[in-house]
């Protein structure tokens, strides 16, 4: 297994493929880890690009500190990862759900490091987002102890289920995650309109965050929105082929290091 | 289905099959720990998810360990051609057969 020390933490990192483009994959919150991207998208993309997947802090096989789960912490981890791997050219960030939120936050902070954005069911913190997500996770923490859920866990008493539940409980109940998410400052049109790199946004028609997709299409200066009909939030796993088709087609059309970063003589670094 | 076994396991070189199976077992030990696997038999029919009960992120680490061991094997293309349900229902024998086929 491969670990990279970034921002003072040990992160589980997987590297695949090679190519002029570098694509970094960021997964969703709590129950997710890098495997959702690995099983669906990373390998097809890695046929023509350098691909890096990592478990966000607290997730998968990465270290789970007791504190430090602000979006700024995630942004600092990504910067530390790029620096640790000595990746200096602009990269494509592919974020699913919360991973999209981190990708947008990183791009606002370090636009020179980002060639483009692939946003699948991406959240971003509109007014009240932090409170809503924190509340959902608090309910989740209680939910895992409901009799019906405990009965399911007993009937499906498999090692991987036990580990997943134990990790999620520890993460929700024993770290600063909920408090840190509650404090995420909201932003909107003004901030998003400063993100100039090209973006692809893919959402499900019936997703609970479909409005974020329309917001991105309206406010990002260069955003292509694809809406999958009769689909909800979990399109990466449920509608993999369609999402993959949109991502591969869009990525193929993009220059290696993004439009603003192409060297005049055509020679990449 | 791209993971379909093109060469029946019975027709594969038994020494190579055994050697690759041992490699899979060894990398699994590294990834998920010897204590757990001591009590679980690993055969060509064993499934990673239902029988071994390994987490998907552990399967990723297994693939990485095998890629390091068998540098000539193109895991990226193999996985890229599979759908999620195929990966989740994968048997040890399918992985062993794929590696053996690449080794020739």
Image (cartoon, coloured by chain):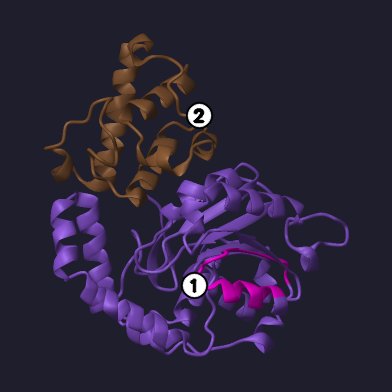
Chain colours: A purple, B brown
Disc 1 is placed on an element classified as: loop
Give the label on residue B2, or none: 2
Disc number for residue A208? 1
Indicate whether B22 appears above or below B104. below
| Left or right relative to A229: residue A21 | right
Quick check: do tags 1 and 2 share a chain?
Answer: no
Q: Is the residue B70 above or below the residue A52 in the image?
A: above
Q: Position of residue A109 (x, y in %)?
A: 61, 80
Q: Is the residue A210 above or below the residue A54 in the image?
A: below
Write down the chain letter for disc 2. B
Residue at x 49%, y 37% (from the top left corner):
B82
Q: Please, what secondary structure does the residue beneath circle 2 have?
A: loop
- A140 left or right of A150 in image: right
Which region is colored magenta? A197-217
Q: Which residue appears farthest toward the top when viewing the image?
A: B11
Which disc, if any, is residue A159?
A: none
Residue at 43% x, 85% y is A130
User: Does the stretch in magenta take in A210?
Assistant: yes
Rendering quarter of residue A228: bottom right
| Residue B19 falls inside the magenta stretch | no
Residue A66: in sight, yes or no?
Answer: no
| Residue A13 seen from this side | yes
Which one is closest to the eye, mark 1 or mark 2? 1
Q: Could you classify mark 2 by the number of other residues whose Cα lies within 10 Å: few (under 14), some (14-19), or many (20 or more)? A: few
Front residue of A17/B82: it is B82
User: Residue A216 location in percent, x, y?
Assistant: 65, 75
Residue lying at the far right in this picture: please name it.
A265
**In which quarter of the view is residue A61 placed?**
bottom left
From the viewer's side, name the closer residue of B92 and A83. B92
- Specify the subunit that label 1 lies on: A
């Amino acid at each position: 297994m491969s670990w990279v020390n970034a921002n003072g933490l040990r992160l589980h990192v997987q590297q695949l493929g090679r190519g002029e483009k570098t694509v970094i994959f960021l997964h969703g919150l709590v129950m997710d880890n890098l495997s959702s991207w690995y099983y669906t998208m990373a390998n097809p993309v890695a046929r023509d690009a350098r691909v890096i997947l990592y478990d966000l802090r607290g997730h998968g096989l990465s270290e789970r500190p007791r504190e430090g789960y602000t979006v700024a912490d995630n942004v600092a981890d990504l910067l530390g990862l790029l620096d640790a791997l000595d990746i200096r050219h602009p990269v494509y960030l592919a974020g699913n759900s919360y991973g999209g939120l981190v990708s947008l936050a990183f791009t606002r902070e370090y636009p020179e490091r980002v060639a483009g954005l692939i946003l699948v069911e991406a959240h971003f913190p509109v007014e009240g987002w932090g409170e809503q997500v924190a509340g959902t996770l608090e309910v989740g923490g209680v939910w895992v102890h409901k009799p019906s859920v405990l009965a399911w866990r007993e009937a499906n008493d498999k090692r991987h289920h036990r580990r997943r539940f134990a990790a999620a409980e520890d993460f929700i109940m024993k770290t600063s995650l909920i408090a840190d998410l509650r404090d995420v400052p909201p932003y909107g049109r003004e901030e998003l309109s400063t993100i100039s790199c090209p973006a692809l946004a893919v959402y499900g028609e019936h997703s609970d965050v479909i409005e974020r997709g329309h917001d991105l299409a309206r406010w990002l200066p260069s955003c292509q929105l694809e809406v999958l009909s009769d689909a909800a939030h979990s399109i990466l796993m449920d509608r993999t082929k369609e999402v993959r088709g949109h991502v591969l087609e869009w990525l193929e059309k993009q220059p290696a290091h993004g439009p603003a970063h192409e060297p005049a003589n055509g020679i990449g670094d | 289905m791209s993971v379909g076994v093109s060469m029946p396991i019975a027709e594969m070189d038994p020494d190579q099959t055994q050697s690759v199976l041992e490699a899979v077992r060894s990398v699994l030990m590294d990834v998920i720990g010897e204590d757990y696997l001591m009590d679980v038999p690993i055969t060509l029919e064993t499934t990673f998810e239902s029988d071994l009960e390994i987490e998907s992120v552990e399967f990723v680490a297994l693939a990485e360990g095998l890629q390091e061991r068998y540098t000539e094997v193109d895991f990226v293309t193999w996985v890229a051609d599979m759908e999620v349900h195929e990966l989740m229902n994968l048997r040890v024998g399918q992985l062993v057969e794929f590696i053996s086929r690449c080794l020739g």
